[in-house]
Image: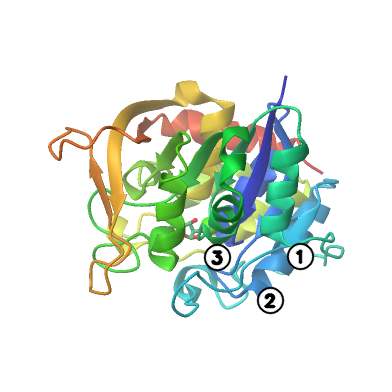
Amino acid sequence: MPIPVIIDCDPGTDDAVALLLAFASPELSVLAVTVAGGNAGLHCTLPNALALTALANSPTPVHAGADRPLLGRFRSEPGVHGDDGLGGVKLPPGGQPAPGLAADVIRSLLRSHPEPLTLIGIGPATNLAIALATEPALAKKVARIVLMSGSREAGNVTPEAEFNAWSDPEALSILLDAGRPVVFATLELTAQALVTPARIAAWRARGSGSCLQAACDIQASVPPSPRFGRRGAPLHDPCAVAWLIRPDLFTVRPCSVRVDLGPGPGRGRTLFDPGGRTGDPPNATVLETLDADGFFELLGQRLANLP
Ligand code: RIB
Ligand code: CA
């Protein structure tokens, strides 16, 4: 039976590939896509999600959500994703957003679906947090929360913090307090999923479908990261989706994790303690290693199956 999921995202060049992977994978039943501001403002991330859903011919409803974090002001990441969130790649416009705001739809689906749902969070966690904070009893309908979030060492938006955690640390803290299994694809995991020109070329050679070509064009727009000697850029968000589809490509480790909610330079830092030195009980699972060749093969195969 396919795993029923809700994907909360901020497309986003890597969110784009994550959404296409999810739409192409019979292992998942994507009940809804909910959108937040993040990589770009909601005025871009929402139409981007609509365009990607239409490109994949997916019937999945797309819902608008938070355009800012729970506290503080909205800050985007144009350096990686461009001002429009998709690196300047123009897709045919999608349809209209489905009625209902993200947090209301997440709660409604949790309430009504016959089995617990998996929440996939690949952007700032604001929508997921509002849903669970305003109806905590629904946590029992959450099978697990799978996040691209956090870093065990250096950050990517500040020296200390990863972008999604930094964008709304209070939201991440609410998810950690929900008492449900939380799985993290951190920057250390996604660093093993480096998109290189050779890997993009290998994808392109697999077919001529619009989704495959769009994924290649979008990934080719991402500047190679100086953190990796400009060999390529980490493909963050599809790691969270791929774990649900092919957990055999990953190794995992239980871990305690806390998030820094202070106002200082460490705000949004995630404090992972795999060795249990803090004495805190493990409250999360961290994805530790990735079979990168298997991951890119999965992506190429699934993207080539899309329209
Ligand atoms: O730090 C990487 C994460 O922040 C990814 O989800 C990327 O899309 C941005 O949202
Ligand atoms: Ca994202």
Provide residue 211's location: percent of width, then percent of height.
74, 49
| Mark pair 1, 3: CA separation | 14 Å
Q: Is residue 72 visible?
A: yes
Give the secondary structure at mark 2. Answer: helix
- Of the two numbered discs 3 and 2 on the same chain, state the one appearing first in sequence: 2
- Of the two numbered discs 2 and 1 on the same chain, state the one appearing first in sequence: 2
Do tag 3 and tag 2 residues touch (Cβ < 8 Å)? Answer: no
| Mark pair 3, 2: CA separation | 20 Å
> Are there few (<14), some (14-19), or many (20+) residues within 10 Å of tag 3?
some
Do tag 2 and tag 1 residues touch (Cβ < 8 Å)? Answer: no
Give the secondary structure at mark 1. Answer: loop
For the point 65% across and 41% down, the residue is 21
299 and 44: which is toward the camera: 44
Relative to 172, residue 188 above or below: above
**Relative side of 56 to 222, left or right:** right
Residue 91 marker: 1
Q: Which residue is mark 3?
A: 221
Q: Which residue is mark 2?
A: 43
For the point 29% across and 32% down, the residue is 282
Provide residue 304's location: percent of width, then percent of height.
71, 38
Q: Quadrant of residue 277?
A: top left
Q: Amino acid at mark 3?
A: Ser
**Relative side of 126 to 72, left or right:** right
Relative to 227, residue 208 above or below: above
Give the number of the mark in front: 1 or 3.
1
36 and 86: which is toward the camera: 36
Q: How many marks do you count on the picture? A: 3
